[in-house]
Amino acid sequence: MQHGCGGLICFCRTATHQISCHLLPQCPFFSYMQLVTGIRAQQQQAEVCQNIIKWCKAEKRTFLRQRVEAKLAFILYEQKKYSDALTLVDDLLVELKKLDDKQLLVETHLVESKIHHGLRGVAKAKAALTASRTCANAIYVAPTLQSTIDSMSGTLHCEEGDYNTAHSYFLEAFEQLDQMDDRERAIKALKYMMLCRILDSLTKALKLSAAGGVGAKSDRSDVDLSGMISGKQGVKYAGKDIEAMSAIAAAASRRSLKEFESVIDQYSAQLQEDVLIKHHLGILSEQLLESNLIRIIEPYSCVEISHVASLIEMPQPTVEKKLSQMILDGKFQGILDQGKGQLIVYEEGEKDAVIEKGLQVISNMDNVVSSLFDRAGALTVMMS
């Protein structure tokens, strides 16, 4: 493969001397990059792109170099080399903004948004996506690219906890990909739709939070996750990926942490390789653990930690550490008696409205006095 790649590059270097600039994107470089797939092929794609960029700089083929650099940035993103990809994108965007190449700006800003999302910078990812959408409004956008923009929009709304809006974006992307018979990307969009339904149902029924910051008490033992996908979708795209998400939904609806973790282990290839799904399933696992612990300790005022660990079927040190964290986070009132190996739970008292109002008055008075002090200082300066 390496000899074939080298031969192709040499052939194209010779042939492109007789090809006009506007026809260069159709040359065999790009055909070759579309054919190779997989982890090893991604490395070969990166090497091919780097060789082409060097040749373009030597031959002063600016437009071709910019397009290949955009392709290289996307390959580096897929290889999870976020720092290298971001550096390349930043330099490329400076050039593209001067040329006002809308089409390539849309694609490059979209790659930038994906890179920031991979780095967990949601605010910067959202800003890059907004820039991509702004450029897209001025030109015709192909359905393939539009589905990618919709999918990225859904991803960012999902990160912010707006699952209904995220589901709508993923549905738009899925319908476009389904019409184009792009099975691989359509399955991915369908998985995201199912993830949004799971997270939305759990948020409403178990009072769970997208950020993992609220309590987990609930009177409902089951979560309604019926009708996540239609029968037609389930039949057409049936496979390991849909089975994995259905199994996650079943485990979450029963609030079974053990079943949830076993599903993740069983379908690790389908659930752990995607950044969005892996992140939210990690948060969901922590929240299900909190929900189960609170449900176990609710009837008790004093309970042995070993008993809680045996009921939840987890190691005692792990349970003890989690209970300590939950107490510090204010998930429930209590203390850990490590000498006796017990958890002492206090009843939640009603909040004293008088104290809260008093603290608010003191805070307001502090603001007034600080303002008067600043004005007095300003007058002193003026008088002197």
Image (tube, rainbow, N blue to C red):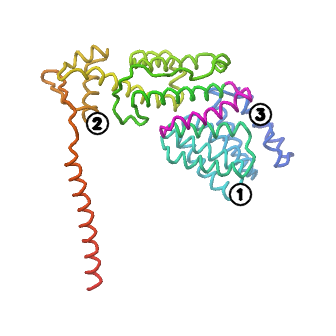
Q: Could you tell me how far apart the alpha carbons at marks 1 and 2 are, in whole angstroms?
A: 52 Å
Q: For numbered disc 3, what is the local secondary structure? A: helix
Rendering quarter of residue 49: top right
Question: Which is more toward the observer, 5 or 311?
Answer: 311
- Residue position marked by numbered label 2 in the rendering: 329
Rendering quarter of residue 378: bottom left
Question: Which is more toward the observer, 117 or 375?
Answer: 375
- Residue position marked by numbered label 1 in the rendering: 99
Q: Residue lying farthest bottom?
A: 384
Q: Could you tell me how far apart the alpha carbons at marks 3 and 2 are, in whole angstroms?
A: 55 Å
Identify the mark nearer the N-term, 1 or 3.
3
**Residue 302: x %, y % from top left:** 17, 22
Q: Is residue 13 above or below residue 363?
A: above
Instruction: Give the dominant element type of the magenta stretch: helix, strand or loop.
Output: helix
Three-letter residue code for mark 2? Asp
Q: What stretch is highlighted in magenta?
A: 159-183
- Viewer-nearest of discs 3 and 2: 2
Q: Which mark is residue 302?
A: none
Q: Residue lying farthest front?
A: 354
